[in-house]
Image (tube, rainbow, N blue to C red):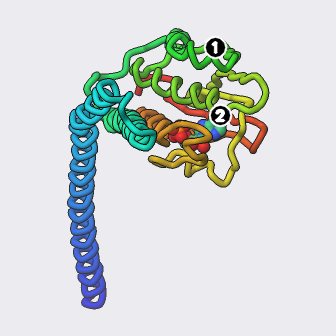
């Protein structure tokens, strides 16, 4: 009996030790989660203020350069005029970069309340109207299947469609750009696809292209800031979904997919 009691006491002591360790691990996890959240929030606030506040001085530089060009453009030497053009191009580029960064940071601010039900097809039609000029310029043909009702904030869905479709047109090959948008229901998810017949992407970069500022081409070949897909990823992940490069190979077009919950959670 004494042996039995001793064994039970040993088990009880082991349990107490394990319990204490588990409690410590939980407290530690909570602490580091809190710290991570704080650091993330600080970073977001920093990125938001930087991109927001930098617009103002940039505008001053840009307006001053424009005034300078207007008032003494004729008198400038060829070299000075080229410096001035570089300033104007630089400010234009920085302006786009700051706006894209601001859109990226705003993509996590949940100020709109729970997602309403929206007709994804009508969101798509509006996006195509916005992209009317690049679509016409490229002679692009955009087609789509019947698209469903989804529970997403309209502005966010519109941003995702816009980024994917404008990329599909921008990274076009020699043929007339063709873009097709379709959807499939898989388990509890709606999986949207945006397929193009453009220049395609080497599979090695399938994950990297979603990184902030990650680009596979020079600005001279294709303009852009490398933020578009990162914005899409940030938006889609907020709704618990995923976005990925489904298939692509150089010269044969690309298909991007994103999933969103089929029903409200
Ligand atoms: P940006 O277009 O401003 O460079 P994105 O984040 O939208 O930034 O895209 C990242 C990179 O992924 C692009 O620079 C391009 O190399 C590649 N990419 C994106 N979409 C496509 C596409 N439809 N076809 C080919 N390449 C693409």
**Residue 160 shown left or right of residue 61 in the figure:** right
Disc 2 target residue: 171
Question: Where the N terminus falls, by quadrant?
Answer: bottom left
Find residue 76 and report its image quarter. Answer: top left
Mark number displayed over residue 214: none
Check the image and report above or below for 70 versus 92. above
Mark number displayed over residue 136: 1
**Residue at horizontal 26%, vertical 31%?**
64
**Badge 1: few (under 14), some or many (20 or more) residues near its Cα, within 10 Å?**
few
Q: Position of residue 6 (x, y in %)?
A: 25, 87
**Badge 2: few (under 14), some or many (20 or more) residues near its Cα, within 10 Å?**
some
The answer to whether mark 2 and mark 1 are in CB contact below 8 A is no
**Residue at horizontal 74%, vertical 30%?**
197
Residue 90 seen in the current view: no
Q: Nearer the viewer, residue 163 or 72?
A: 72
Q: Is disc 2 placed on a helix, strand or loop? A: loop
**Residue 255 shown left or right of residue 103 in the figure:** right
Q: Is disc 1 placed on a helix, strand or loop? A: helix
**Residue at horizontal 29%, vertical 90%?**
3
Indicate which disc, 2 or 1, sits on the residue closer to the N terminus: 1
Find ligand 1 in the image and state its quadrant.
top right
């Amino acid at each position: 009996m004494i042996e039995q009691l001793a064994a039970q006491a040993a088990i009880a002591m082991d349990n107490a030790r394990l319990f204490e360790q588990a409690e410590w691990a939980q407290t530690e996890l909570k602490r580091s989660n809190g710290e991570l959240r704080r650091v993330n929030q600080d970073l977001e606030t920093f990125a938001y203020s930087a991109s927001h506040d930098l617009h103002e001085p940039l505008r001053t530089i840009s307006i001053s350069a424009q005034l300078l060009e207007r008032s003494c453009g004729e008198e400038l030497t060829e070299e000075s005029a080229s410096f001035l053009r570089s300033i104007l191009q630089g400010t234009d580029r920085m302006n786009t970069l700051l706006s894209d960064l601001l859109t990226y940071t705003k993509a996590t601010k949940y100020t709109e309340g729970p997602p309403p039900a929206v007709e994804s097809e009508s969101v798509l039609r509006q996006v195509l109207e916005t992209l009317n000029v690049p679509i016409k310029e490229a002679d692009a043909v955009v087609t789509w299947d019947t698209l469903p009702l989804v529970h997403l904030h309209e502005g966010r869905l519109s941003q995702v469609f816009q980024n994917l479709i404008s990329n599909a047109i921008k990274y076009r090959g020699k043929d007339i750009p063709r873009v097709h948008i379709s959807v499939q229901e898989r388990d509890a998810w709606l999986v949207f696809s945006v397929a193009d017949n453009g220049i395609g992407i080497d599979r090695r970069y399938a994950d990297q292209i979603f990184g902030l500022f990650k680009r596979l081409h020079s600005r001279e070949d294709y303009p852009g800031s490398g933020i578009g897909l990162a914005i899409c990823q940030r938006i889609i992940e907020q709704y618990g979904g995923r976005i990925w490069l489904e298939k692509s190979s150089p010269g044969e077009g690309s298909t991007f997919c994103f999933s969103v919950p089929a029903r409200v959670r």
